[in-house]
Image: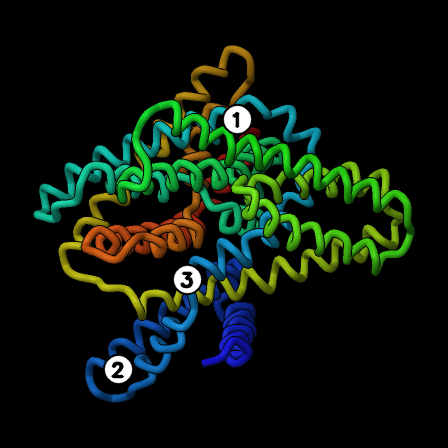
Amino acid sequence: MDFLNTTAVLISLAALFSYLNYRYLKIPTTIGIMLIALSISLGLLAADSLGLTHLGAHAEKMLRSIDFYKALMQGMLSFLLFAGALHVSLNDLLKQKWLILFLATVGILVSTFLVGCMSWVVLNGLGLEISFIYCLVFGALISPTDPIAVMGILKGAGVSQSLKTKIAGESLFNDGVGVVIFLVLLDIATGRSGADAQSISLLLLQEAGGGLLFGLVSGYLVFRMLRQIDNYQVEVLLTLALVMGGYALANALHVSGPIAMVVAGLIIGNHGRSLAMSEKTRKHLDMFWELVDEVLNAVLFVLIGMEILVLNFRGEYLLAALVIIPIVLAARYVSVGLPVILLRRFHGFSPHVLEILTWSGLRGGISVALALSLPLGIERDVILAITYSVVVFSILVQGLTIGALVNGNNRGWRG
């Protein structure tokens, strides 16, 4: 299928599934869309295996024509991160800066190591002989929380502003750091680079630090341009150029595009909104980016739900996933617990903040996209199947219950 037809199919499915969810399921939109897409995909697989239809084969052919990694990491992600950062208060973020910094750096490293070590034990114990470095690669791609999934769920979870800032701030920044760590470990696993500390540190500094600096510069330049005009069509177009052109340029400069878009979004959403826009422009800008966010989220979760059609699942892969899901949650608990313990002397926390931060750490399309980018081989098949299982559990189980965890019998939790 060509690009136009594929896009038409995905948009149509997203619209239909959104309607069905709103009309009948009445659960958060992204979760409902993915649940419907996953259910239909499993139904197609079952029907094809019984020889009743060949629709599953046609759907699989369409999905194989879509490069999920490029579609998300080099397409949708820039829009979704910018749209998410646009509505995050910079003042609130600065109040939580040390916790967010720890979670997005130390937390990711701790989780990567813990998941990697325990996964190596589990996989080799099940006879799946995956090297230790590839287990660390899996730890790196599954450890970052997905800002797209997280912020979509937080909208209706009834989380306090303080806790929402912690969760959203971490998810916006840790995916950029996690992608850098993933790329470093993958280069080591495939022999493209050495494992010396100096080269790793330089790459991390270039990607993460460069992305931060690029986001500051590009966001500030567009902010200055916005201050000089009062025309909402041109101002919306400038933000669109910032996202598309800025992300492409960041990738060309080999700095982190995700981090750059988050920083640029924070600048435009805070300083730009208050100092460079009229009320009319703010209204149109919000409406535009909210619509972009909703449409791309819907399409993304359709893709996630249907991705099972092209995965290679075997019994031992599913068994490994069942064991590794609680390992990922345990590693998440430890990785958020360490920063909270270290900062508890200087910052007040609710006694339940660890449980909420752990359970709200959703994994999503970014983890699946990174797994799909692995070179072909047994490692890719195993890691992809387990990653998909963790993501499905994360979105369906954690996503559907986080609101109850926060609101159930603990309405006074403040975070």
**The disc labelled 2 sits on which kind of residue?**
Ala
Above or below: residue 217 compared with residue 77: above
Residue in view at x 55 percent, y 58 percent? 76
Instruction: Determine whether the residue tagged by mark 1 lies in a helix, strand or loop.
Output: helix
Residue 217 shows up from this direction: yes
CA neighbours of label 2 inside 10 A, class few (<14), some (14 to 19), many (20+): some
Q: Which residue is mark 3?
A: 304
Residue at the image point whose x is 45% and y is 28% from the top: 202
Kindly identify which numbered label has been placed on residue 101.
1
> Crowding at label 3, few (<14), some or many (≥20) Cα neighbours within 10 Å?
many
Please tell me which residue is depicted at 52% across the width and 24% down the height of the picture.
99
Where residue 326 sits: x, y (%)? 27, 41
The amino acid type found where label 1 is placed reads: Leu
Render colour scheme: rainbow
Picture quarter containing residue 68? bottom left
Q: Residue 221 at x, y = what percent?
A: 77, 40
Mark 1 crowd level (few <14, some 14–19, many ≥20, 10 Å Cα): some
Instruction: Classify residue 271 as left or right of residue 154.
Output: right
Q: Residue at position x 18%, y 49% from top?
A: 320
Q: Secondary structure at mark 3?
A: helix
Considering every residue shown, the one lying at the far top of the view is: 345
Looking at the image, residue 24 lies above or below residue 49: above
Task: Confirm or deny contact between disc 2 and disc 3 (CB under 8 A).
Answer: no
Looking at the image, which is closer to me, 125 or 377? 377
Q: Amino acid at mark 3?
A: Ile
Quarter of the image containing the C terminus? top right
Residue 84 located left or right of residue 231: left
Considering only order in the chain, which callout, 2 or 1, is on the residue closer to the N terminus?
2
The residue beneath circle 2 is 47
